[in-house]
Image (cartoon, rainbow, N blue to C red):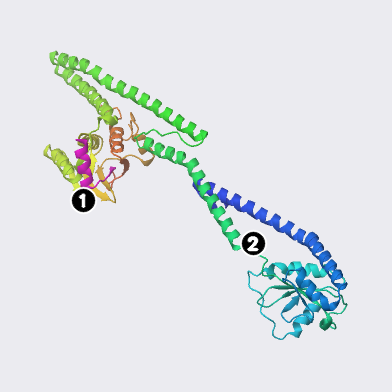
Amino acid sequence: MLRSLLPRSLRARLLLFTLGTILLVQAATFASLSYYRKKFTEEVAVEFTATTIRTLRASLAEIPSDERADFVRGASQNEWHLWSRSLPSDASLEGKPGQARIQRAHRHPPPPPPSGDIRNNLRGFVKALNMRLSDGTRVALSRGPEPKLYISLLPDSDLESTRANREWLVIPLDRIAPPVATPMVLVWLTGMGLFLLLAAAFSWHITRPLTRLAKAADQLAAGQPQRVVPSGPSETRLLGERFNAMLDTLAESSAVQRTLLAGLPHDLKGPLSRMWLRIEMVDDPTFQEGMRKDVQDMQRMVNQFIGFVRGSDPGSYQFSPLELGAWLEEQVSAWESAGSPVTLAGMSRRPLNLKADKVALGRLLDNLITNALNHAAPPVEITLEAESDMAVITVADHGPGISPERRAEALRPFSRLDDARTRTGSVGLGLALADAIARAHGGSLALDEAAGGGLAVRIRLPLKPAETAATDGKKRS
């Protein structure tokens, strides 16, 4: 269940991990600060304030009652003043039984302070302070528009009966800022945003080389290898260097293979020519016919080797703009004029333009048609369709076909499916060559079952707008 909720990409997981870590640390910090702040308020601030109130009350007790108001104003530089009457109607006590009686005495109490008022933060502190003061001193908060703190200075045991005889010290609270102001919240959110941007840049720095490497691996699988630039941390740099070394090894092996395949047919041409000459010098017609057939098979194998070497060499391709519909009609017409059972069964109505090597593409089509005529049953039906931005050429025959579990094997070089088709004179390079040519054009080749039960070979080639194809052709020329 947890695995299904996680994002698939490494970049998203790194961002989620960084964000989760930041939020977890912030939550732990906030919880710790709240705990120690509450503990400080209960154990230190309340006790210190209670001691200060007792000292202040004792000091004022030594001053005559008619001089106390002037003393308070002078000592506080006109910020505090003495309220020598009962507790005002806009004040409320916290934490004492008298609070309920006072609130019941007011039928229409003032509305509570707004959410950002300092009194909301001092309510718990005042409640703890009233619980700590056991000598009759009371602390109250105003409930009107102006935040004030009221402190009773003369002790008494019954609050309800002596409200009129108490003296209250009035302390304005408008100069005290809330514990967490709005600018601090904005600073915290800005810091979080910067941390997330740094996390995104960090994850991009880590995952970018891996994304490039994955793209290079896809190009290698498509037959278009491309080197990567090693970047990022040391591990991804090392991975990029190893990938480039692998490409060099594969390129060297491919070059050796092409040289081997190209040299072998060249070396066989001389003996084959001499064999043709000696066959003509023999007087036995039966012997001549058998030898001609064997030499023709050998010549066909040599041609397949040569075609595969040319088709698998990316440097041998010469791409130019091509209108696929007209080109395909010309190719099929050439087969029909030779009397072969090849028909154009379907044609796309819109023009299909692409960049292609006409010679290589003709070799692909001829190879598929020849395979269908030699190893299947006629007629061979060819169709051209358009699927989104791809052109699809389908070559279908009416033979036994190839079973689905062996189709991947049929596309490998030198693969022989003797139980499916007769391979006389074949080395198993026909479908492999067609697949190599399709991939060299940025497309793909797939084997499927035809509607009549035979084999359908579908070649998908990427389309290109006519204007762009023509411009690219001019640049290349």
Q: Residue 349: image x %, image y %?
A: 19, 52
Q: Which residue is mark 2?
A: 180
Look at 71% across and 86% down and name the residue there: 107
| 475 falls in the magenta region | yes
- Say which residue label 1 marks: 348
The single residue placed furthest to the bottom in the displayed view is: 107
> Can residue 94 be seen in this snapshot?
no
Near mark 1 (Cα within 10 A), the count class, few <14, some 14-19 or many ≥20, is some
Going 81% across and 62% down the picture, which residue do you hit? Answer: 48
User: Going from the N terminus, do you reach mark 2 or mark 1 first?
Assistant: 2
In this rendering, is residue 430 above or below 55? above
What's the amino acid at mark 2? Val
Quadrant assignment, res 103: bottom right
Q: In this picture, which residue range is highlighted in magenta?
A: 455-477
Relative to the observer, which residue lies in front, 149 or 376?
A: 149
Q: Residue at x 59, y 63 (%)?
A: 182
- In the image, is residue 196 above or below residue 315? below
Q: Amino acid at mark 1?
A: Ser
Is 236 on the left or on the right of 388, as rendered? right
108 or 386, nearer to the observer: 108
Q: Rounded to the nearest whole Å, what is the CA distance between mark 2 and mark 1?
A: 71 Å
For numbered disc 2, what is the local secondary structure?
Answer: loop
CB atoms of marks 2 and 1 within 8 Å: no
Left or right: residue 287 versus residue 166 is left
Report the residue at 59% width, 51% height from top.
20
What is the number of the mark on residue 147? none
In the rendered image, is residue 122 in sight? yes
Q: Position of residue 381 (x, y in %)?
A: 21, 44
The percent coordinates of residue 36 (x first, y second) are: 74, 56
Q: Secondary structure at mark 1?
A: loop
